[in-house]
Image: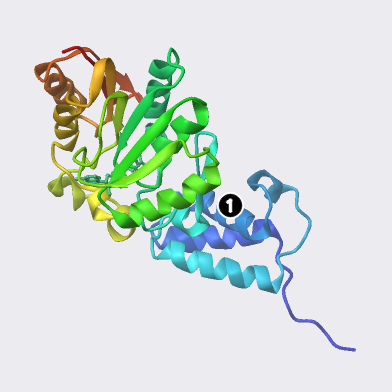
């Protein structure tokens, strides 16, 4: 008789072990990340971890070890999973572009609220990255035609792949260029989530951002105000500008919009009750 010495590992045992490993590596939310990684490898929903009675196979354990190694090196969970939810879309994400953030969903919300009255609006997204804003607008407003620009060819190649996945029927054009220099108006809406972390703040950011996300997608000074200044030449009268900004930057950005001639300037909070979106109407 042969005695099998291999240990049978159940999903929750694996979660517990991974949690300890991630905690030791300083990962900020080790339990949640452990659950997400184990569920991903097993191909089940996170909630099913608590009822699953299938042991982890040797092959799954090997895959899990590889993902945990990456997370221990502080690679963002989104890049490890390769996909990330943004509004109704499941976007491909990797080091070519910034991971779409929840506060940017509020930016899209504000854009859609404005576009509600339009049948076929022309929209410009400055700094498209993975495609999050441009594709979500095209996905949720069936008549919107979106031009989306980025200075990074890497980001644009990812946005192109996400455009295919989103199936937005040729209503999104991707353009390489510096801010608004390569696009022609007029637009009903200009939206941007520009890089807005100052070089000083950058050094204090977590390793997930500093080691993996593109520097040019994160760091920028007064880029929002530059977009606001240039957008005046491209917006139709009555058109709207919607900008995301960093925590603590909204009052100064709102003031910049007013001094550039925008009216009806509004600041909107994100889900954490911080003013992160500033918008205004172009009334020449
Ligand atoms: C904060 S990310 C936003 C990405 C995406 N829109 C999102 O919300 O997830 C800023 C993007 O602006 C792009 N960018 C930075 N400077 C730029 C410039 N001068 N002209 C055009 N795009 C620029 C970066 O490459 C990056 O993709």
Q: Is residue 13 left or right of residue 94?
A: right
| Residue 86 at least partly seen | yes
Image quadrant assignment for residue 214: bottom left
Q: Is residue 276 left or right of residue 55?
A: left
Task: Specify the quadrant that holds the C terminus.
Answer: top left
Residue at the extreme bottom of the image, as rendered? 1
Helix, strand or loop for disc 1: helix
| Residue 275 at least partly seen | no
Identified at 54% across, 61% down, the residue is 18
Neighbor class of circle 1 (other Cα within 10 Å; few <14, some 14-19, many 20+) is: many
**Where residue 69 sits in the image (x, y, percent)?**
47, 68
Identified at 50% across, 56% down, the residue is 82
**Where residue 226 sits in the image (x, y, percent)?**
14, 34
Task: Specify the quadrant that holds the N terminus.
Answer: bottom right
Indicate whether 26 appears above or below 128.
below
Rendered-image quarter of ligand 1: top left
Give the labeled residue for mark 1.
Answer: 35
Query: How was the colour assigned to the protein in this rendering?
Result: rainbow
Q: Is residue 134 left or right of residue 176?
A: right
Residue at the extreme right of the image, as rendered? 1
Q: Nearer the viewer, residue 131 or 231?
A: 231
**Where residue 93 sits in the image (x, y, percent)?**
45, 52
Q: Nearer the viewer, residue 258 or 271?
A: 258
**Where residue 224 sits in the image (x, y, percent)?**
19, 33
Image quadrant assignment for residue 37: bottom right
Q: Is mark 1 within 8 Å of ligand 1?
A: no
Q: Nearer the viewer, residue 27 or 171?
A: 171
Please give the count of numbered marks on the rendered protein: 1
Q: Is residue 86 left or right of residue 246?
A: right
Identified at 31% across, 56% down, the residue is 153
């Amino acid at each position: 008789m042969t005695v099998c010495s291999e240990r049978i590992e159940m999903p929750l045992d694996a979660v517990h072990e991974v949690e300890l490993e991630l905690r030791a590596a300083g990962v900020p939310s080790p339990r949640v990340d452990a659950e997400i990684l184990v569920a991903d490898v097993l191909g089940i929903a996170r909630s099913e971890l608590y009822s699953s009675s299938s042991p982890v196979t040797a092959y799954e354990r090997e895959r899990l070890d590889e993902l945990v190694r990456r997370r221990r090196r502080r690679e963002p969970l989104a890049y490890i999973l390769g996909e990330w939810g943004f509004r109704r879309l499941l976007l491909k994400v990797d080091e070519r572009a910034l991971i779409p953030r929840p506060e940017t969903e509020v930016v899209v919300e504000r854009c859609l609220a404005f576009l509600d009255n339009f049948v076929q609006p022309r929209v410009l997204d400055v700094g498209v990255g993975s495609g999050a804003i441009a594709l979500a607008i095209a996905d949720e407003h069936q008549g919107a035609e979106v031009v989306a620009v980025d200075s990074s060819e890497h980001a644009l190649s990812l946005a192109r792949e996400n455009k295919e996945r989103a199936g937005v029927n040729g209503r999104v054009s991707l353009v390489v260029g510096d801010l608004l220099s390569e696009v022609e108006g007029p637009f009903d809406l200009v939206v941007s989530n520009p890089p807005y972390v100052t070089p000083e703040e950058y050094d204090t950011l977590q390793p997930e951002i500093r080691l993996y996300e593109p520097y040019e997608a994160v760091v920028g000074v007064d880029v929002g105000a530059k977009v606001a200044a240039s957008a005046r030449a491209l917006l139709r009268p009555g058109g709207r500008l919607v900008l995301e900004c960093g925590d603590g930057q909204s009052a100064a950005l709102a003031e910049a919009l007013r001094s550039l001639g925008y009216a009806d300037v509004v600041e909107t909070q994100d889900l954490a009750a911080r003013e992160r979106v500033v918008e205004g109407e172009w009334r020449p």
